[in-house]
Amino acid sequence: MKDKINQLLRKPFAVPALLSALIVLAYGLLTPWMGFYWDDLPFAWFLRFFGPAEFIEGFRPFRPLLGYIFAVTTSIFGGHPLTWQLLGLLIRLLLGLELWSLLRKVFPSRERSVLWVVLLFTLYPAYGQQWVAFTHINQELIPLLFLLSSFILSINLLRSGKTSVPLSVLAILLQALGLFSTEYFFGLEILRFFFILVILSESVADKKELARKTLLQWLPYLAVWIINALWTYSYHRSTAYSSYQIDILALLSPLALVNEFINTLSLSSFVSWLGTFNIFSQIDGSTTQIIAFVILMLASIMAFGIISNKRQEPNAENPSTSHSLLFTPHWFLLIGVVTIFAGRLPSWAAALPLKIEFDYDRFFVSIMLGASLFIVGLADLILKEGKVKLVVLSLIIGMSAAYQFTVANTYRRDWANTQDIFWQMAWRMPDLKEDTTVLTYELPLKYLSDYQLMSMLNWMYAPELNSRDLPYALQYLKTRFTPAQIRADRPIDVTYRTVSFSGNTSKSVVIYKEADGCLRVLDPIYNNAETVPGASFYLLDAIPLSDPNLILTNVDAPAMDKILFGGEPSHGWCYTYAQAEIARQTGDWEEVVKLYKDAQKAELSPTLPVEYLPFIEAFAQTGDIDTALKLTERTIKGQPTLCPALNTLWNRVSVKADISEAESLLQKECTP
């Protein structure tokens, strides 16, 4: 039985099957629940309202050739989030298979090491943006497919010893597509030089002759690389460009170089792998952690089983070819280090920091191949061949897969939270007057920011938009305003690629959403600064600008595209709270009371004490002082910092009712 299993694991389909299984375990288990993240959302909006050709103009100021890739892929695949998530899994598989094919040609006698590199590359934990699929498939993964395809063609031609003009031209064309469409992989062209050098070293012993022949083989690709460098630099310096500026000279000080070397090597080659163990630093027994542990075991066992059945490496200390660089662990390490820094070059030149956190972790997409080569070279050097190396690298594979699953779950939660926020927005604000700006300090979302959410806002309130003048804007106060700008009658002008918005701070609605609470519309009277104790001064200064009259309440709810917003959630507490705020806005206190009583019958209760406030006022305004007092006491016990807000609330009520009991309660409970 064991022999049959071993024979099966040696079959040609074993590696593609292993790659497929690992990709599904790491990235694919939560695919049906994934959505759009970061720039995915505005890109989907552009596609829906303006069509694929819009990407060509939209990318012109940034990456003028990348827009054509978006135009082609969106024409074929459309804009459904599930389609792009599935494509992301497929392209990850294709990248792994391409790399496997390439490295086997370059290092034909290092089958195990090659496969380790491929698996580590596929699951590289520092790159945590697999699920920003719409953006990164087009912006990075497809160009990387082109570049690896170019490598494969050129290496195959070198191995065959034949000259083929059509294949050489195709290799150069694929190289150009990979380099000119995006700057991410500019530095990786140096890999082709090293691959040619390794192959020629098998038959050329003289170092000078080896260098000459390598350079000669690389020359056509070097010419394209130089042209790409000159074109990129000149375009970035031109008036047509509008994004990050290249300033290499400012980064060339010895101290900056040493710091960059240490930081990049540390993050990409050590911290990235060791950080995966943090998912088990505290055992909490959660479903996510249990599934991650199962993935760890499955991925480790599969990697161990298949790679242990691959051909054993030759002894690195006694290479079969005395002058060949092919079997030297130091050579793997050297290529890895060079590739790490070659991959870092574009983001470093733009003075962008390298961090293992969203959204800076996108820069690791061009580093992950070098880091994988480096870690395998280090394992070859320190652990040699044997069970210890198999176990250690299998464990790293398993931990990387488990880690990526836990990251995937944070994306799943974030999309669910995004949809929930917009449903609450629709319940509380059925419609908005045009030219309204929705202001907030920030929303409790990790993978979407205000400019991305602005497209979702317009998608909801302007589903038939046919103009590039946006009727609505969403702005984060913390990132788009200085304190001096948070004043009445200040213009708000937003330009995002090919669309724009023109508004005014005096036509704003301020919203607030705590992670565990319901969405609230803030205003100078009811939801004033006293109701958000401890909030940033950015938010507090904006509250006087909030005008609830811009909210149209006597209209049908907005048409919510189910593909984007999902189905309407069950009408829980936050639905009740939203309806109560609408009723309070229109002065219908009886309706607020009715809503609370219906919620009690349905066993619904506030998620945060502040959400009692409209109901306290409604009971007081309609004469049920006893219930208002009970809810007041409950609110104080739950959140004593709301005492000033409760004092203000009862002072409003005093116009219509005797509040002596409330004053006594507040004095008793709120006095230190």
Image (spheres, grey):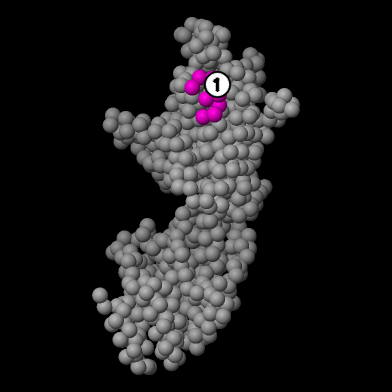
Identify residue type, mark 1: Gly
- Asked whether residue 559 is in view, the answer is yes
The answer to whether residue 164 is above or below residue 410 is above
| Residue 585 on image: x %, y % | 46, 81
Q: In the image shown, does 9 or 541 lie closer to the viewer?
A: 9
Q: Tag 1, which secondary structure?
A: loop
Q: Position of residue 124 (x, y in %)?
A: 52, 37
> Residue at point 64% right, 28% down?
306
Q: Which residues are magenta?
A: 383-392
The quarter of the picture where the C terminus appears is bottom left
Point 60% across, 50% down: residue: 30
The quarter holding residue 663 reads bottom left
Disc 1 target residue: 386
Q: Is residue 106 left or right of residue 665?
A: right
Q: Is residue 48 left or right of residue 361?
A: right
- Check if residue 578 falls in the magenta segment: no
